[in-house]
Image (cartoon, rainbow, N blue to C red):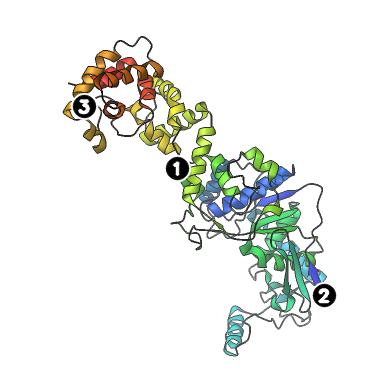
Amino acid sequence: MTAHTANTSESKTVVTRFAPSPTGFLHIGGARTALFNWLFARHHSGKFLLRIEDTDRARSTPEATEAIFNGMRWMGLDWDDDAVSQYSRIERHANAAKQMLENGSAYRCYSTKEEIDAAREQAKADNRPTRFDSPWRDKTDADWPSDAPYAVRLKAPREGETVVNDQVQGRVTWSNDQLDDLILLRSDGVPTYMLAVVVDDYEMGVTHVIRGDDHLTNAARQTLIYDGLGWNTPIFAHIPLIHGPDGAKLSKRHGALGVDAYEEMGYLPEAMRNYLARLSWSHGDEEFFTTEQAIEWFGLEAVGKSAARFDFDKLANLNGQHIRAASNERLTTACVARYTLREGQEMSAKQKTDLLAAMPSLKDRAKTLNELLDTAGYIFATRPLEFDEKAQKQLTDDARAMLGELTSHLREARDWTTEELETITKAFAEQRAIKLGKIAQPLRAVLTGRAVSPGIYDVMATLGRDETLARIGDQST
């Protein structure tokens, strides 16, 4: 019994690759695949390559290619060497098919599409497998028609089994009588995906092919192509797909968006790396970790077989942790850029200074950069402020009167600091024999226009003496 087994020997230098088709955005599943390849290569001090599989000229676009580049850059997944266009290597793929013709591992197939379709329909009617068995498999050059177009097909073994020792799925076998003579080169001379991938991976020196488990059957077929070319196979690792929180196939309602959408929603790239790394891979019970830690810990042995579940709440919570861990300067820079894009104008120098000063309190509860920027809205507001519905309810006649009384106490502050402002406000509440919230809530409303904000003393300190007193004065009686 003949067995074709994928080689699992280690190479001195680990080389991984990410090979997306440029037919749309870089989606979450692709980003996770790219991340796993990147982490594995960086963990082993190897190389991570990027190949754009653009042989489908009808669907591949330069815009989609650029979207993939931008998504990779935002994710922080830098690749080694120049990105490779698969289309640019078509001649090399075709030469490999000719090489297989010459060594007998492939053959010319002159069957037309109509003949193939008819054979499959007949097989279906006879309740037989619809695999096409070409009548040209064992023909010689004496039988070939002159000047007729032909496809080049793999001469797959009919007996034995093909084995892939997968680093995630374990030992997977296929009976060779279930594997068809797949087309390597179409009759128009265009190589197929299966052939192109094998040739490119081999000639790019890829040692580990890490990809979604929807490609697992491809590993068997590609192993036969490697055999036909006399090449060692890479080490395969087929990772489980990502599902929605309900266990169904990931869709747009679950979050199957481009990574650019997550950037627009205000997620940090390090949080996306952290969260995506945890989908099907783990390091003990660690949930929050840095990219440096992920590189240090990552290994294929810790990748599970079960489909991962995408959860927006977990992503948001993790993003909030990364926001709190980020430097105030970095978050300010990110918010300035986001503000400019959203408002169509630059922040003033004072607004930037105030934003940086307020950042410790702003980032305390924010889960996204958008939330953070929204919470900082009081810094950019101009008098007279507009109030949301809940803030308006706080500004009763009694509250306005209290604010007027509080103003005279605030004017006496020697140092406009959170500590002194808190002391003055609490003393005022005690003097009036009221709970602190009775004055703090209308004070928050009058200063920010909202019923929810960072700590009110932080708000006052950020706005400064003059602006704070002016905003209170606009509404107090």
Q: Which mark is residue 264?
A: 1
Q: Tell me, yes or no, whether the two marked residues, 3 and 2, touch with CB atoms within 8 Å.
A: no
User: In the visual, does 415 lie left or right of 314?
Assistant: left
Is any atom of residue 191 visible in this view? Answer: no
What's the residue type where badge 1 is placed?
A: Glu
What's the residue type where badge 3 is placed?
A: Ala
User: In the visual, does 83 lie left or right of 322?
Assistant: right
Q: Which is more foreground, mark 3 or mark 2?
A: 3
Number of residues whose C-alpha sits closer than 10 Å to that of mark 2, classed few (under 14), some (14–19) or many (20 or more): few
- As rendered, which of 56 and 210 lies closer to the eye? 210
Number of residues whose C-alpha sits closer than 10 Å to that of mark 3, classed few (under 14), some (14–19) or many (20 or more): many
Mark 3 or mark 2: which comes first in sequence?
A: 2
Quarter of the image where the N terminus is located: bottom right
User: In the visual, does 436 lie left or right of 316?
Assistant: left
- Spatial CA span between label 1 and label 3: 39 Å
Q: Which mark is residue 446?
A: none
Q: Residue at x 25, y 23 (%)?
A: 433
Q: Position of residue 352 (x, y in %)?
A: 42, 23
Mark 1 or mark 2: which comes first in sequence?
A: 2
- Spatial CA span between label 3 and label 2: 88 Å
What's the residue type where badge 2 is placed?
A: Thr
Q: Which mark is residue 399?
A: 3
Please say if 62 is above or below 126: above
- Kindly indicate the quadrant of the structure image that contains residue 448: top left
Q: Residue at x 69, y 62 (%)?
A: 169
Q: Residue at x 40, y 33 (%)?
A: 373
Q: Which mark is residue 2?
A: 2
User: In the visual, does 460 lie left or right of 164?
Assistant: left
Number of residues whose C-alpha sits closer than 10 Å to that of mark 1, classed few (under 14), some (14–19) or many (20 or more): few
Please say if 320 is above or below 127: above
Residue ranking furthest to the bottom? 126
